[in-house]
Amino acid sequence: MRTRKGTQMLRTILARRTHTAFQDTPVPESALNHILSAGMLAPTRFHQRPWHFIILRDAEVKQEIASALRLKPSLAGAPIWIAVVAEEDGPAAWDLDAAAAAQSMLIAATALGLGSAWLMPWLGNPDALGRVEQLLGLPANVHLAMILAVGFPAEELPAHREEEVYESSRVHLEQVRHAPSNAPAC
Amino acid sequence: MYSAIEVIQQRRTLRRFTTANISDDDIQRLLTAAMAAPSLMGRKPWHFVVIRDAEVKKRIAEAFRVHPQLAEAPVWIAFLADVSASPAWRMDLSAAVMNTLLQATAMGLGATWIGTVDSKWTPGQVEACRTLYIPEGWELFAFVAVGKPAEQRPPHVLDPYVFSTRVHEGKWGNRRQVPSPQYHSEGGKQ
Ligand SMILES: Cc1cc2nc3c(=O)[nH]c(=O)nc-3n(C[C@H](O)[C@H](O)[C@H](O)COP(=O)(O)O)c2cc1C
Ligand SMILES: Cc1cc2nc3c(=O)[nH]c(=O)nc-3n(C[C@H](O)[C@H](O)[C@H](O)COP(=O)(O)O)c2cc1C
């Protein structure tokens, strides 16, 4: 059953693209609040809500992090970075909770006409991660999950196309039938 | 596109479903949403199994000890990750699940994220692995149970205290200069 809301939602989801260049135009505070709310309305395991959000606006700080992590310099030009961090609490699902919040925020940003990028350039480099965590002043039990860059895009990127996004080869009915290795793991 | 904000505000985990079936077209839209998620370097480590067989749902639900009502959802979607495809597969798959939940909400469907990833070799994992024929190197990341909702849950109302204590300026512990009473002033009711 195709509903108008369903169609609009899918359009927003498909319009979300990773932007790496931004206008200087500041992000309105009301838009930022919508984005943060979207993060805090996302599901978390056992409703634990382990996340916190650190807003980075200072151009020098962004540039410093960007160059330390070899990010594309134009990413530092996003007026706002949101560092999503999470408290470790019991079995490790903080990364999932943070990721759900991040995706919720990216969808909100897209709906508000903003461009965004999900950044984790420290993957495979724990020292770099440690340095950024130190710069953010995180306590020992709080981890940096990802940084989201947000701003009005310098150029419009085309939305994903439904027919290209949906790959039927990844969809199995009742059982995995065409995996690279045929033997099940169990 | 603004209504996505409303959808985000309305989304709740729903665990009771009617017996009404979900069409293949609806499933395709949910999975299109999943596959439009961002992934590290565009690696797309995800694969999906659409489960409609009532016996299978029941067996897996029991093995994982999830709420029996969840087995009554007409469709379960297994979210699988090819671990070798992306070191950030946990994040990539979370984003895909999140998109699916939002798309389901917008379509008037109820959905539940059933987390399974941290239970390697538990009875649930073994049952699912055998039944779904999960290959070596793939992880069962989660199920999403989907159906027409037989319950309604009110949207979350964000506690302004939570809102203000979870947002920091520039550094951990720096409270935000601008308090945020007006954060719902545009778009959608809270
Ligand atoms: C990683 C993760 C795992 C979850 N696992 C389950 C689960 O196994 N069973 C369940 O009923 N709900 C599960 N949930 C749903 C949460 O319980 C739910 O999101 C939380 O209570 C907040 O409620 P809301 O989704 O209505 O906002 C999970 C959520 C997340 C993010
Ligand atoms: C977990 C994760 C980590 C990512 N890390 C980076 C990053 O460090 N730098 C970057 O430019 N993009 C990063 N991305 C964005 C992906 O490269 C992007 O989502 C992918 O290429 C697909 O493009 P799209 O987002 O426009 O659909 C990341 C995405 C995810 C989900």
Image: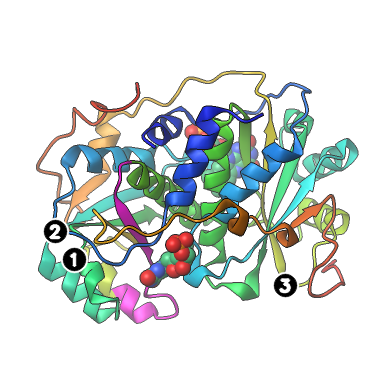
Q: Which residue is mark 3?
A: B137
The disc placed on residue A121 is: none
Q: Residue at x 36, y 47 (%)?
A: A110
Q: Residue B35: x, y in percent? A: 59, 55
Q: Give, as a three-letter code, the residue at label 1.
A: Gly
Determine the CA span between mark 1 and mark 2: 7 Å
Residue A144 in sight: no
Cα gap from disc 2 to disc 3, whole angstroms: 44 Å
Q: CA distance from mark 3 to mark 1?
A: 39 Å
Q: Are marks 2 and 3 in contact (CB under 8 Å)?
A: no
The quadrant holding residue B178 is top left
Question: Residue A24: which disc?
Answer: 2
Q: Residue reaching furthest right?
A: B55
* Kind of residue at disc 2: Asp
Q: Is residue A51 left or right of residue B37?
A: left
Q: Residue at x 74, y 32 (%)?
A: B22
Same chain, marks 3 and 1? Answer: no
Chain bearing tag 1 is A
Mark 1 close to ligand 2, CB under 8 Å: no
Q: Amino acid at mark 3?
A: Gly
Tag 1 near tag 2, CB within 8 Å: yes
* Disc marking residue A77: 1
Query: Which residue is painted at 26% across and 71% down in the image?
Result: A132
- For label 3, count other residues whose C-alpha is less than 10 Å away and answer few (under 14), some (14-19) or many (20+): some
Residue A25 versus residue B81 in the image, above or below: above
Magenta part of the protein: which range?
Answer: A112-130
Which image quadrant shows ligand 2?
bottom left
Q: Do marks 2 and 3 both belong to one polypeptide chain?
A: no
